[in-house]
Image (cartoon, rainbow, N blue to C red):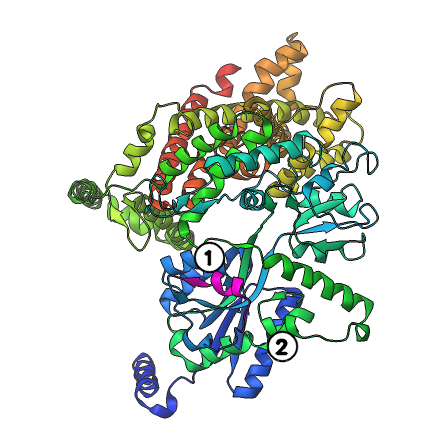
Amino acid sequence: MKLLRALVTLIAVVAMTLFLPGCAEPPRGIVLWHPYRGGEEAALKKGVLRFEAERGVKVTILAVPYEAYLAKLEAAIPRGNGPDVFVGPHNRLGEYLLHRLVAPVGDAFPEVDAPLYEPVTVAAVTYEGERWAVPLASKCGALYYNPRLLPDAPRTLDELAAKRDFALGSGIWPLAYESHTAYWHAALLHAYGGELFGAPKPGEPGAGAPPGFAMTGEAAERSLDKARELVTSRVVPDEASGDLVKTLFTTGKAAAVISGPWLAGDLEDKVPYEVVPLPSIPGVGAMRPFLTVDGVFMTPEGAKSEGARALARSLGDAASASERAEIGKQVVATRSYWSAQDDAAARSPAAERQRRLLVAFHDASADAIPMPVSPAMNPVWVPAEQAIRKVLRGDASPRDALAEAKARYDDVMRTPPSEAASPAPLVVVVGLGLLAAAFAVVRRVRAPDFRRELAASKPAYKYVLHAALTILVLVVLPLVAGAAMSFFAGSREDARFVGLGNYVEILTARGKPLLSHGSFYLTLLVTVAWTVVNVALHVSIGLVLGIALARPVLRLRAIYRVLLIIPWAVPSYVTALAWKGMFHRQFGAINAILVAVGAEPISWFAKFSTAFAANVATNVWLGFPFMMVVVMGALTSISKDVLEAAEVDGATRWQAFRLVTLPLLRPTLLPAVVLGSVWTFNMFNVVFLVSGGEPDGTTDILVSEAYRWAFARNAQLGYAAAYAVIIFGLLALMSKVLGRIGGGGDAKEAL
């Protein structure tokens, strides 16, 4: 009766909510998402508060971490749970359009006689004749220089090159930037008239084709020659990461660096600096960096709301621009802020310095190139950077490296099968499998003892039900979904069933030689070698250290144990980044030790052997403590009587270890070896963060190769899912084989 009353009450509440106007859910107002932090977030909130006071509309603001921003938008907006407006970089517009996340901003971008926004920012948010965002701020590269080392602002690269060879002092670089990355090399490329991504020009081969890999031809080759000249003549350090560029500048080891406005927040008062637009190349032209524009985008639902459009318009007006420039330190896109002539004498020294910094980046943005918005831009980065690094290392000429990069881009972007395969064979196979499973279940249920055993096991099922459901939801269902995805090709919005097409492509090396670059079989050989070498070293080192630390006569054993477990306790990505820095060719600790003992420094990531060794060294450091702890635990379970009996029988220490201790350790070590093999086989962090697949992707393992197909090669999720299914099958087979090998003997038999 109580249950019936509760059910009637629930139905009544639902009916009142749906049909009575006074009980309807109140409007949620306007929802705004953004990825900002610090001053940028504070300035945005101030503009929103002013809008709420003026319009009387509630605005809900949600800050989402930038790393998860796109994924959150893709998951929420199509289901009606996302924002009405959101702030994001313009270069993701292609992905926004691909997943139907945005709509034209309409009257949020007012048409007036005098342009409200800088022309370059308007061009960035305009695509196919439509304006898709209200521009807020721009970001691009500029030249930071130290006035103590360079009294006059460098105007050309030749002026900086003239400062090499101890002209600035021992160990001081004239210029530092990330020369091996496509993003920063683009400034050189644009100076020579080249492009990273674009459509063939009229009259060129392939004219009229869709935009694609455009880093070819004389301009691109000359830009690579110039980059190599800067490195080989010691004007620019090789293999410089963003952190290294910052460190060199803050410590006075670099007279000038190329970076974006974000670097200023890290410099503070650590070093004196000024900022000017990028220098020019004599006889060629000015270096032109890529430009990124942050804008306010409208979702399809938000674009229907006049209040949401008014909010976007308000965030781009002059008042908000002034707040974002002064509080958020942004290079705002609103023209009125830059045309205002305020009194410099009325500003504090810190405010005047900040104003000069913003003006410098504003001047640099005027000649910058807006980043392309096509989703096909993402697959350009990897082959372009591989070509740049090959040339900088001297492994290939610019022409050969670029031709190879273009071929790899074309291979990644080739059209999936145009005709969808029939799902009938797969349906038949799955149906037969389910039918066989059903027969097995029926046969089991009809067994005479089944009901009795089921009744006796009911209490046990209650205890394990929650764990079984958790495994079903978190493990089994994702595996099934991934396996199902592997039978499709194309984007999520235009997926086509191709049956076993992805598996055929993988197992036939996409029609290329079986051991060609990037093929499944070559990557599998590298993965197997990687797993065998690492696990062998993990077990060997762990066994030696575990036995040594288990000896009761060893003094300070507790301290040694704690120190040796530390590598296991530190997160793997932190350790990987630390070891990557130690393997740096010019500034790494490993090469510093080699130089100290009279050896030549090594470019660790220039050859497969040394890059593989760097990865192995990092992973061994991470993995041996686990095996050491397993061995120490297993040794405590071995009875001293057995070892004393072996000693009485006249066995030496080596014989006692080989014939007594090791066989007794094997039942405990085997599960650890299987687990370590699975971990190592899929050790993505080390490979991705230490070598990054260098040189030229040869140190990639299967899991990092699958990652690249999913996230760096035009989001070919079906192809990556097929890789994942194959990896799962290989790991299951490997675990089975190792289990049988370990189960073939017994410690008692060995005794």
Image position, residue 109 (x, y; %): 46, 74
Q: Image height check: is 563 above or below 313? A: above
SS for dot 1 = helix
Tell me the residue at 64%/9% (across/down): 651
* Mark 2–mark 1 distance (CA, rounded to whole Å): 26 Å
Quarter of image, res 233: top right
Tell me the residue at 72%/51% (across/down): 144
Image position, residue 734 (x, y; %): 41, 28
Nearer to the camera, 394 or 685:
394
- 119 part of magenta stretch: yes
Q: Which residue is mark 2?
A: 46
Quarter of image, res 596: top right
Tell me the residue at 35%/85% (across/down): 17
Please indicate, yes or no, whether residue 393 appears anywhere in the rendered image. Answer: yes
Q: What residue span does the magenta drawing correspond to?
A: 116-127
SS for dot 2 = helix
Assess whether mark 1 and mark 2 are in contact (beta carbons under 8 angstroms): no
Nearer to the camera, 643 or 65:
65
Image position, residue 699 (x, y; %): 51, 29
Q: Which residue is mark 1?
A: 92
Q: Image height check: is 601 above or below 181? A: above
Q: Image height check: is 531 above or below 362? A: above
Tell me the residue at 45%/34% (across/down): 405
- Few, some or many residues within 10 Å of mark 1 (<14, 14–19, 20+): some
Image position, residue 415 (x, y; %): 29, 42
Q: Amino acid at mark 1?
A: Arg
- Few, some or many residues within 10 Å of mark 2 (<14, 14–19, 20+): some
Q: Amino acid at mark 2?
A: Lys
From the viewer's perspective, is 386 left or right of 360? left
